[in-house]
Image: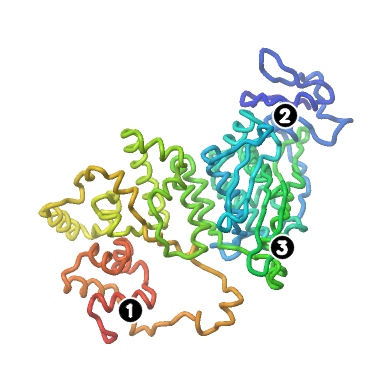
Amino acid sequence: MAYKIPGHCLACDTCRPVCPTGAVQIKDNHYWIDPNLCNNCEGYYSEPQCLMLCPISCPLPSESKKGRYKAELRPVTSPSLFANGKNHPFASSMVMWELCNLLTQRQSLDWKFDEVGEPYYERRVNGGRGMITLRMSDHSIGELALTGIQSFDIRAACMHLIYAAHATALEKPWEEEFIISDRQIEEYLELDKRKDLSKATKLSLIRKIAEQPCFITGSINWPKQGKVNKFLIVNSPLWHLTEVQHHFQEDEMGCKYLVGLTFKIKAGIWAKYFLNQQGCKEQTAFYQYGILPQSLLSIVMSIWQQHEGAVRMMLWLLFKTKMGKEQRITVPKLMRVAYGEEKLTFASQRREERKRLLRTFERDLECLNHYGLKPVFDSVTYPPEIQPLWAKLGELPDDADAALDFWIQDGSNETRITDASPRGKWNLLMNARILWFELPVDWEQRMKTPKQQQRGTQTRKIKLKPEMNLLPEQIVTARKQQGMSQRELARITGKSQSWIRDLENGRLSAKFSDQTLLRKVLGLNKNH
């Protein structure tokens, strides 16, 4: 049964040289397969080579499928991630962050060229005493290399995180392989819910984003840190794609259809130094990990086109929050993460570009807030006057009558929520800070370290008796008695307005430390 090449062919010329019968030909600048010469590679290979090597699995059988399929047996895969339905540990060392950063920032990074024209990206670590250098594994140079960098798909960062999560399940990930199937990847990325994509399209996308993290090699010059001696790694792949298995089904006419993929992956030598449990116990290596929320992967897959800046900030926060939640983050830092240094510099010089970038930044912050990563603005450097409108509306009551009173009161004020932003907003934002981001529960869950387990009572959470818990109606009543608005209470307690609103609506409960703070501010004693 002959194959054919449909109209979405990339014309990459991968299939033509490998065809054993010369059936793949170019006619009028289009690739086609001569049905008189094509024989499914029988007598030469066990599988059709054009289909096996095509990056988008383009070739199709020339006749429609008929009858039942004969299914191939698939290899046993590694255990699936997210057994608790929420999150899973993942390797979160500096090396893993830099690869994630490269896959999301792509050409926005500060790429340099060596003496032969190969691009490389370097990052100094440990106060400038060490260096991480990343390169393309194909050793392309000049414009060709930049085109390759630009072709990276931001969704490949999700596959990189999936690999980093699977690596934590192995005792020696730099020696052991893990196996992932297309079915697992579809589940992780929620592609199984995409009814608008055909199976061939899904497989093509999965193969593309699964391969891209394996195209990067890294050189690591790490200085002595504590009892861990200095070490040097030179041009080692961060992920080894050791094998890609194609799974076909065959109908009664002998037509083979690609129905599945299996990837065998092994971590690079970096894991021996940054993901080594035994070495960590012996204080000869590190074991650095964080928590990967499953929701993050599905969010990235759903918003990457409309909110690429939000995706970059979200992935940056994933690695940053492992160092502690409450950190002051400057707005220029967030903008560099989301849009790159070049765009930020360009916007600072052009008024229209500044306005456009500000609108994009506020929409991306709103997107983060919508998915549970709620920014807490510094009331001093980031006052309500320059905050986004959606943040100002955070204390708008849900009740219709209360909302009407809210707008009446707002209209009688000297400054209104809907007033235009003040002049010089850009300059004010360049000095503004976000105190921290309130995180969803599946982001904040942490595993106990050995030191925390030894402390025992020091890390044990304080459980409140039912009668000691502050009820939502108690908070509302006390706040109104004090003559405070939700916004004012949020400012005094250092929380966000949405946090106060959710607390009063009963959508969340405060921690012991937060309840103590609320009792103090609202003048409540433990008997209330």
Q: Position of residue 410 (x, y in %)?
A: 15, 54
Looking at the image, residue 112 lies above or below residue 35? below
Return the residue nearer the eye: 195 or 135: 135
Looking at the image, residue 472 lies above or below residue 71? below
Tag 2 secondary structure: strand
Q: Quadrant of the C terminus?
A: bottom left
Q: Quadrant of the N terminus?
A: top right
What is the residue that sits farthest to the bottom in this orientation? 527
- Which residue shows up at 64% across the image and 26% down it? 10
Q: Earlier in the sequence, mark 3 or mark 2?
A: 2
Looking at the image, residue 467 lies above or below residue 33? below
For disc 1, the neighbor class at 10 Å (few under 14, some 14 to 19, many from 20) is some
- Which residue shows up at 35% across the image and 46% down it? 362
Q: Position of residue 106 (x, y in %)?
A: 55, 40
Amino acid type shown at disc 2: Pro
- Which residue shows up at 38% across the image and 58% down it? 374
Amino acid type shown at disc 1: Thr
Q: Earlier in the sequence, mark 1 or mark 2?
A: 2
Q: Is residue 158 visible?
A: no
Q: Which label belongs to residue 61?
A: 2
Report the residue marked by disc 1: 516
Q: Is residue 417 visible?
A: yes
Q: Position of residue 473 (x, y in %)?
A: 25, 73
Q: Which label sits in the foreground, 3 or 2? A: 3
Report the residue marked by disc 3: 170
Q: CA distance from mark 1 to mark 2?
A: 69 Å
Return the residue nearer the eye: 396 or 98: 98
